[in-house]
Amino acid sequence: MKVTILTEGGSNIGFGHITRCIALYQAFNKKGFAVNMLINGDDSVKPLLKGLRYNLCDWLKKAAGLEKYIPKADIAVIDSYLAPKRIYEFVSKKIKTVVYIDDFKRISYPKGIVVNGAIGAEKIKYPARKGVKYLLGTKFTPLRKEFWLAPKKKIRKHIKNVLISFGGTDTAGLACKLEDYLKERYDFDITVINAKNRLSASKIKKEMLKTDLCISACGQTTYELARCGAPTIGIGFADNQRTNIKGWKAAGFMEFAGWKTNGKLFKNIIDTINGLDFEKRKILSIAGSKQVDGRGGDRVIKNIYN
């Protein structure tokens, strides 16, 4: 069976959509599906896609791109904040099974399967509609194959290694400024992951398992951090992260320091770090590990296959 995944990402809008679509790609591939990605993005996404079948195409504007790829697919997946409803309806009419990745009830979806793997998504009041099935919550969070398995996190008595992970959302270079700020105050070994210093998934996992504390944007990365049990301080970068922030705080996994525009953000981070003793970090680690087990992609595909 053939699967086409339509998504977006790049240097201006980040890589969260692409990351979770890679996770679904790998889950489909594991089950023997033939998968191709159609990505509305720039060359900055290419390092993430090594070894995968994909085409860069502005499928939002070029109907020819959709006409070329969609009829060949048995299953389509759409993960977008930009696509208008007419695109969803067009794909729904062409393909028997369509999967819509959602974060905040963005539109009223046509017939198909809506997947929202966000923490607390079960509490969102989606409309009950004939022909629409909902898969909600971290049970259905797709993670890249490197995160399907993870050892139990070892929590050290004192913070030594710190990971700063702002991904493609860090257009103002906040990560490097924070790194300098922390180095003036602590003797930490600091690793920075941002648009200029992207690591492979395996290296990211290694850093997450090694770190004593991560300071992260509140997007897709938080689910990989939770899987690894990495105690996390969250920073809000975009309005679409509100569900994650609320959910992770409620689950007891994340300490939220504020939004990137907060004038007291760095002070809040320092105050939070000083309050994270060994016992508190252990509680955060366990809370994250309980929420994400790495099997979300398999569950999504099982529901699609059924």
Image: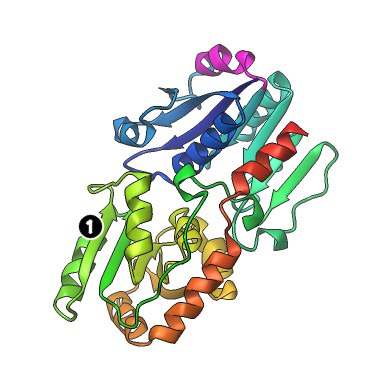
Left or right, 180 with respect to 245, comes to left
Give the magenta part as a residue range. Answer: 64-74
**Residue type of the residue flagged with mark 1:** Gly
Mark 1 residue element:
loop
Q: Looking at the image, which is closer to me, 205 or 12? A: 205
Q: Residue 262: x, y in percent?
A: 34, 73
Residue 180 in sight from this viewpoint: yes
Quadrant of the frame with the C terminus: top right
Question: Residue placed at 37% from the left, 60% from the top?
Answer: 208
Pointer 1: residues within 10 angstroms few (<14), some, or many (20+)? few
Magenta segment's dominant SS is helix
Q: Taking 167 as reference, is 265 above or below it?
A: below
Quadrant of the image containing the N terminus: top right
Considering depth in this image, is 56 or 259 the residue closer to the camera?
A: 56
- The residue indicated by pointer 1 is 173
Q: Residue at x 45, y 29 (%)?
A: 39
State left or right for residue 6 relative to residue 185. right
Q: Hey, which residue is sitting farthest left in the picture?
A: 184
The reply, left or right, for residue 180 in relation to residue 22 is: left
**Would you say residue 253 is visible in this rendering?**
no
On the image, the x and y values in percent for residue 240 come to 51, 56
Q: Tell me how many marks there are.
A: 1
In the picture shown, does residue 123 fall above or below 132? below
For the point 25% across and 58% down, the residue is 192
Q: Quadrant of residue 2?
A: top right
Relative depth, front residue between 116 and 227: 227
Q: Position of residue 304 (x, y in %)?
A: 72, 35
Membership of 98 in magenta stretch:
no
Q: Position of residue 15 (x, y in %)?
A: 40, 44
